[in-house]
């Protein structure tokens, strides 16, 4: 029997309607459009303003669209993994809420948290179910409502993050398309530089934690930047080397959208031109687990069967990694 690989057979995405521009941020904190664009590449980001809606709202839209695009009935889906750092609730898992709301009645589901590398780690996890031969339809979603943990008085973080996400369908492939290789890493010694101080079991919510604004993302940007530039480029280069790929062999780099300068460092290390790099940071900012599926969604029409694609991410934890896959379909 030929080897089973896990191929992406469809992509969808969702971003909320509300656009928070750099100009609007200028009225909220001491910042300016020129600083934000030069230092990060971001011009605007989306914010989910719907009262009482969390990350599941984003994933629900993406999953419904994915089912339609791939001509899949909800009953056929066997598993959904939602990568997110901003689940609707501590429990139950956002995946369970989504499965219930989108009619995935035969699927089991769970969330996976690896900050900005969440989608990458979830894609790797989902692929193993397919490669085992036991599962045929697995949905991997990555989404975050970052606005729920951002302090809009802190100019060092509020300019970066946005809300949004996407989903992919994974199915078995025996023709050599799909996920080929991966390099995934984590290092908990990076935790102090990017984390949320309170709200977990170590420091549950109290009046004091709220008053101290400890329920927001805390980041030491320059330190994270240094690790990200090296980490993301290292793993992308390693996965290419292991598979004897040169820059010319790579059709697309799909990089986590945290900072345009980190993306440029990675593509230059891979020796690929900017025309092969997926970019939407200018429009969506950093949507954490949402960036990679949103890139695939935006660029889906330009992808061709057989394209060599390198995904790469770096984020809180620290977590980072790169996945090499061969795209499995031409535009519809
Ligand atoms: O996706 C998860 C992983 N996260 C990342 O990969 C993010 C990595 N870090 C970064 O992208 C960058 O470090 C930031 C965009 C967060 C910050 O850029 P930076 O070039 O590292 O700036 P900085 O923190 O070194 O600050 C430089 C200056 C400072 O002023 P002084 O001390 O030089 O006078 C800041 O106070 O810029 C100032 N500054 C701002 N000025 C205008 C910081 N934030 C702002 C702002 N607007 N929003």
Image (cartoon, helix red, strand yellow):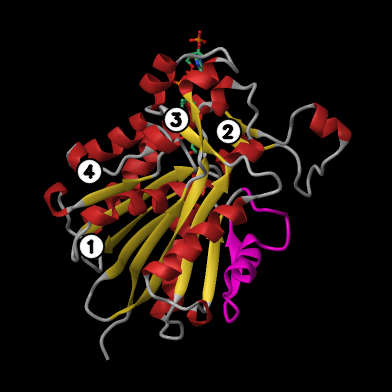
Q: Element at badge 2?
A: helix
Spatial separation of the CA atoms under disc 1 and disc 3: 28 Å
Near mark 4 (Cα within 10 A), the count class, few <14, some 14-19 or many ≥20, is: many
Q: Mark 2 points at which residue?
A: 193
Residue in front for this viewpoint, 247 or 148: 148
- For the magenta stretch, what is the residue range? 86-112
**Which residue is at 42% across, 76% downward?**
72
Q: Is residue 121 above or below residue 8?
A: above
Q: Element at badge 1?
A: loop
Q: Name the residue under label 1.
A: 331
**Which residue is at 17% across, 58% downward?**
244
Magenta residue check for 97: yes
Mark 2: C-beta under 8 Å from nearest atom of ligand 1: no
Q: Mark 4 points at which residue?
A: 270
Residue 196: percent from the left, percent from the top? 67, 38
Q: Name the residue under label 3.
A: 44
Residue 259: percent from the left, percent from the top? 40, 32
Mark 4: C-beta under 8 Å from nearest atom of ligand 1: no
Spatial separation of the CA atoms under disc 4 and disc 3: 28 Å
Spatial separation of the CA atoms under disc 4 and disc 1: 26 Å
Near mark 1 (Cα within 10 A), the count class, few <14, some 14-19 or many ≥20, is: few
Mark 1: C-beta under 8 Å from nearest atom of ligand 1: no
Near mark 2 (Cα within 10 A), the count class, few <14, some 14-19 or many ≥20, is: some
Spatial separation of the CA atoms under disc 1 and disc 2: 41 Å
Query: Which quadrant is home to the C terminus?
Result: bottom left
Spatial separation of the CA atoms under disc 3 and disc 2: 25 Å
Q: Relative to residue 219, is residue 265 drawn left or right?
A: left
Q: In this view, does 81 lie above or below 185?
A: below
User: Which label's residue is closer to the chain start, 4 or 3?
Assistant: 3
């Amino acid at each position: 029997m030929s080897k089973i690989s896990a191929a992406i057979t469809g992509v969808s995405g969702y971003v909320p309607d509300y656009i928070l521009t750099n100009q609007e941020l200028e009225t909220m904190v001491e910042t300016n459009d020129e600083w934000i664009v030069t230092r990060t590449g971001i011009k605007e980001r989306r914010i989910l303003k719907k009262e009482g809606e969390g990350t599941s709202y984003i994933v629900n839209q993406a999953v419904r669209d994915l089912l339609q695009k791939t001509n899949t009935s909800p009953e056929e889906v066997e598993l959904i993994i939602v990568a997110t750092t901003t689940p609707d609730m501590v429990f139950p898992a956002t995946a369970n809420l989504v499965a219930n709301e989108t009619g995935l009645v035969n699927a089991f589901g769970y969330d996976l948290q690896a900050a900005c590398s969440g989608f990458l780690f979830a894609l790797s996890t989902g692929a193993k179910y397919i490669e085992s031969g036991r599962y045929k339809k697995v949905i991997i979603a990555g989404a975050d409502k970052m606005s729920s943990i951002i302090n809009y008085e802190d100019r060092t973080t509020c300019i970066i993050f946005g809300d949004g996400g996407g989903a992919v369908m994974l199915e078995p492939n025996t023709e050599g398309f799909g996920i080929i290789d991966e390099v995934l890493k984590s290092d908990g010694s990076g935790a102090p530089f990017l984390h949320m101080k309170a709200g977990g079991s170590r420091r549950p919510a109290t009046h004091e934690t709220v008053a101290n604004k400890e329920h927001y993302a805390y980041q030491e940007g320059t330190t994270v930047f240094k690790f990200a530039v090296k980490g993301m480029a290292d793993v992308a280069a390693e996965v290419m080397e292991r598979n004897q790929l040169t820059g010319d062999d790579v059709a697309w780099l799909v990089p986590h959208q945290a900072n345009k300068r980190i993306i440029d460092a990675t593509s230059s290390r891979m020796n690929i031109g900017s025309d092969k790099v997926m970019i939407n940071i200018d429009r969506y900012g950093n949507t954490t687990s949402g960036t990679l599926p949103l890139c695939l969604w935006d660029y889906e029409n330009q992808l061709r069967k057989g394209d060599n694609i390198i995904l790469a991410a770096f984020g809180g934890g620290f977590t980072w990694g790169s996945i090499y896959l061969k795209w499995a379909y031409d535009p519809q």
